[in-house]
Structure formats: C-alpha cells, structure tokens
Image (cartoon, rainbow, N blue to C red):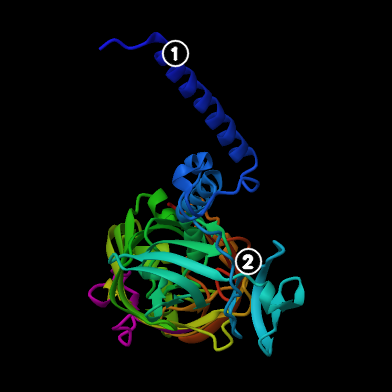
Amino acid sequence: MKINNNIIITLLAFVLLSSIFAVDAYGQQIKHPDTVVCPTDGYVNEWSSNFCIKDGTSLAATKNKILEELLAATTKPVRKSKPALLEVGMSRIFHLRDENIINGTIIEMEGDSIAIIETAEGILRVPAVEILEEMADLVKLDGTHFLGPILSEDAFSITIKTPYGVAVVLKEDIRSMDRYYGDKKVSWTEEKRRFLSGDNVIDIFLDPTAFPLKPNVVYLSGFSIGYGFTESFMLRTEFGRDIIGDLNLHPLFRLYHRSTGKSETALSLGFRLFSRHEDKVESQRYSHWIVNKDDNDKRLDDESSDDLDNILIDSDKRSFFATTYLVLSKKQSLKSGRGKWGWHLGFKTDSYIFSKPKLASEYEWDSAFKLPYRIWGGMDYDLTKKLKFLIEVYADNGHKFIDLEESIDSYFDFGGTPFTVDTQRGEYRPVDLDFGFTYAVNDALRLGAHFQAPYLTIYWKFYQF
C-alpha cells in the first residue's frame, strides 16, 4: 500500500508539536507544582493528565513526598538526651547539657529538681534536668551483653537498667565497656584506667593483704618489684637481696574469692623463697632469743652485747630460707558511698621452726623460742579520694623497735645488704601497733609515712594495657 508523503509529514509534525507542549507543561509543573491543577474526573482525555496521577496530586509534588518518606525511613533519628536518674551517694563524673563536666558526689537531693553535689572545688547546686543521662554498653567475660542507663556505681559494680529489669554487674567481670554521657562516648581504653585507679591495697606497711595485683600490672616499691599475672596470682622479688646474689621469689596465690555488689573477700597463701640467704640476716631479726650463758643470759639485742658476726660459727654461710603466710582480707564500700574500707588478718612463720644457725659455745638459742611467728590485723580507710588511713596491730616474736636514723642507715648500707632494714639492735616488742597515711599523687604513684620502720613508703604501679 502506498502511503502519501503529505500524510507522513503531517503525522510527524503532530507528534513533534505534542512533545514540545508536553515538555513545556512538565517543566511548568516542576517549577510551579502547586499552580498546576490536576483534574479529578475525565483525566484520560486531558493533556494535563499525562502529568498527574489519579488522586489529583501533581506528579512533581508526589515525587517529592515519596523522596521525603524514603529519607525519613533510612535516616536514624537524632537521639534526644534524657535526664539522668539521680540518687544520694552517687559518686562519678556528671556531664551537663551546657558541656560543663563535674566530678563529685551527690550528698543531697532537693526533691527531684536539684542535686547538691560535693566537689573538690566546693558544693554545687545543679538542676537535675541539666545532668545528662549516663548510658553503658558493656560485655562481660562470659559474653553477656547489657545496654542501658546507669542507675548507680561504686568501686565494685555498676547497676544498669534494662527493659527486663535491673542488672548489677561486677567490674572485675567486665571484658569491655563503652560509656555515654548524653551522646558523648567514652571508650573502653579510658574506662580501664578509671577502673584500675581504684586498685586494692596489696600491703599494710610491710605485711601483705589477700588481694593480688591486677593482671598485667607492674609494681615497684622501696623494697621490691612485682607483677600481676592473673586475677589469682602475682609474683614479687626483693631487689636488695638479688643484688648481693640472694635470688628470691615471693609468689602469692589467691585460694578463695567472693565478690558482691558492695564487698569483696579473699583468702590467699603466700611464700618468700630465698636461694642463698645469709644466716645472719634472720639471726639479726631474732637476736632477742640468742643469750649469753656466761653473762647472766644477756640477750644479743642489748646495746652492749657482742656483734653477731663473732657469735655465729659460720657468719658467711648461705642457705635456702623460706617464709609462708596465710591472710584473709575483706573490703567494702562506705555507707556514704564516698570510698571504701578494708580489714586484713594474717599469720606468718618461717623455716627457723625446723633449724637455726649454730652459735659459739658460750651462746645458745633460748629454749622458749620454738615457733617463729607474726600475727597481724590491719585496716585501711579512705579519708578522701587521695588520702588513705592505715592502722595495724601485731604480735611478733622477732619484732624490735628501730628508730628512724638506724632505719635509714640500714637501708642505705651498701657495704652489706642495701635496700633492706636489718639490724641486731633494738627494743624488743613482741606486741606493737603502727599507723600512718598514704597519699595518691596520681593514679600510679603513692607516698606514705608511719611510725615504725621503715617509716616512709613509696610505691608506683604501671598498668600494661
């Protein structure tokens, strides 16, 4: 069939004009979507129906509405910070809406509206609505996961509110935790330092407690250096003895441990093992029990008595020496929530129970000296966040009172055994007490003073993360 060229040209012109009008109408619809009215009836036969949908809404407006709905569905809503749950005794860092940060303890609540917070800078009255909610996202060692607001926190545990109830999590059971103040995140790296800053007391003066060092913690004092291998095992050595060839190790094993939200109890067994210990070292300690048969049983700790080197048959003899002890400790939070206190009970004896060094013929060991022992009871108490009070009462048949000058001379005796306190002289006191203070210079360094040898204490801890 032969098609007329005029008809084809006419049809092409008609399609072209229709396209031009359609593009112009669509452009006007996009530029002014609210000015184009779409028909609601008979739209099939109207040109504008090409750019409208059946409900009469312009195509551009419909497109924009769909895009808005998709955007809302795929974008997380901004989390609005909720007001914090507050109670008297809370001691932590409080983050406020105006970006102020307060480190202190809530000592009073005025209704539900004002929190009275005690800080190092003074007493502050803070509106409760200004304190941001504190959230925790933590994972325990056994894989348990909790996410929710923190209701309370002390030295041992964190209480978290979950949709299913309140969970109390012991800090020692936490493998990782991120904390949120409002929308500000505090990472686990920072949290670990905060947790460890509240470390247990491992010594009351020179007597150990049942609490070992935390894992991966290095400890250095004026007498020894130590390391925490696990939650239940630590190891120390007296470097002053090591210097003169008396290599020694002091392991401590935690045999029992129980921890609740408010207290912690431990029972530990410890040893002091010396490979080449000089006989005169311990003989100096027990010099009160060496008597001169030819001089009315005069004791060797007397100021006018002979020197021990002249009394021991072999004053240079070195042999294996061991001390063993058992200690029970408990610590708990103070009722005010502002710190903690702990008590410690221990018993120690050594290998002199089996054998003692041989003496010159005119001297002998007192027959009453059969069991070397030391029994002690101690307490530590947090006076402030940086200052701790320590007190100890003990019964020790080797203890002698030594004044500060003699203690210093013995410690710096580089011709004998440096960095130790050993002396033959002194006032024999089988029952005595001691008390003093330690001050936290920072999270790692502690300085202290008390009223028995060695009088001054210093120790430093380094946390290996």
Q: Is disc 2 in contact with disc 1, using a CB cutoff of under 8 Å?
A: no
Q: Position of residue 166 (x, y in %)?
A: 41, 81
Who's the residue at 50% across and 74% down the image? Answer: 150
Segment colored magenta: 353-378
Asked which quadrant contains residue 249, the reply is bottom left
Q: Is residue 391 left or right of residue 291?
A: right
Q: Position of residue 258 (x, y in %)?
A: 33, 80
Q: Single out the mark in the foreground, 2 or 1.
A: 1
Q: What residue is disc 1 on?
A: 9
Q: Is residue 181 left or right of residue 358?
A: right
Does the stretch in magenta take in 389? no
Q: Position of residue 366 (x, y in %)?
A: 34, 83
Which corner quadrant holds the N terminus? Answer: top left
Is disc 2 placed on a helix, strand or loop?
helix
Q: Is residue 188 left or right of residue 230?
A: right
Does the stretch in magenta take in 377? yes
Number of numbered labels in the structure image: 2
Q: What residue is disc 2 on?
A: 405
Residue 201 appears in the picture as rendered: no
Amino acid found under the numbered disc labelled 2: Glu
N-term-proximal mark, 2 vs 1: 1
